[in-house]
Amino acid sequence: MTSEHEKAEALKARAKAFAIRVVRLFRALPKTEEARLMGRQLLRAATSVAANYRAATRARSKEEFVSKLGNVVEEADEAVFWIELLIETNVLEPHRVQDLLDEAEQLLAIFAASYHTARHSLR
């Protein structure tokens, strides 16, 4: 059986791997102004997912954990948005980033579910 600590460590590694993939995508974006602007927003959101989840795992209280996890959910949702926008504005072809979008959506779902569970445990 997997412990909560092991699950948190695996999720931390997954969020970091997502951030690294986004860094690599950013480096490969077209050099147009709009691609770089959207790319920077995606880069900021994706790296924030990993950094804020790491911070959440080090929270000193349940309240702090819930607060930091809320930030993770917001940043994950924003990362999904920027990937979708890069696709819908034809900066990127959908097949090139579908796996990345799928991962972003999965991370968002996991973090959102964790946030709701943790928030309800405070009551």
Image (cartoon, helix red, strand yellow):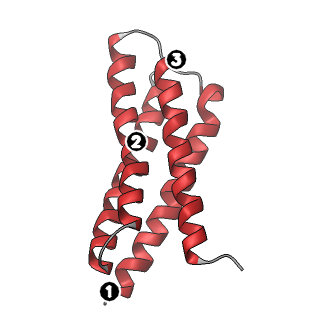
Q: Which residue is mark 1?
A: 122
Q: Which amino acid, mark 1?
A: Leu
- Tell me the amino acid under the disc marked 3: Ala
Q: Secondary structure at mark 3?
A: helix
Q: Residue furthest top?
A: 31
Residue type, label 2: Thr
| Residue at x 27%, y 77% (from the top left corner) | 63
Task: Quickly name the residue at label 3.
Answer: 28
Q: Where is 35 relative to 11, above or below?
A: above
116 relative position to 37: left or right:
right
Q: CA distance from mark 1 to mark 3?
A: 43 Å
Q: Is residue 6 left or right of residue 16?
A: right
Image vertical order of residue 40 relative to residue 30, above or below: below
Q: Is residue 62 above or below residue 55?
A: below
Question: Residue drawn 53% across and 21% down?
Answer: 92
Judge the density around disc 2: few (<14), some (14-19), many (≥20) Cα neighbours within 10 Å.
many
Residue that mark 2 sits on: 47
Q: Is residue 73 in view?
A: no
Q: State which quarter of the image contains the C terminus.
A: bottom left
Per the model, the C-alpha gap separating discs 3 and 2 is 17 Å
Q: Nearer the viewer, mark 2 or mark 1?
A: 2
Asked if one can make out residue 25 in the rendered structure from this viewpoint, the answer is yes
Q: What is the x, y in percent for residue 9?
A: 55, 62
The tag earlier along the polypeptide, 3 or 2, is 3
Please name the residue shown 39% across and 26% down the image.
39
Q: Are marks 1 and 3 in contact (CB under 8 Å)?
A: no
Q: Say what secondary structure mark 2 lies in.
A: helix
Secondary structure, mark 1, is: loop
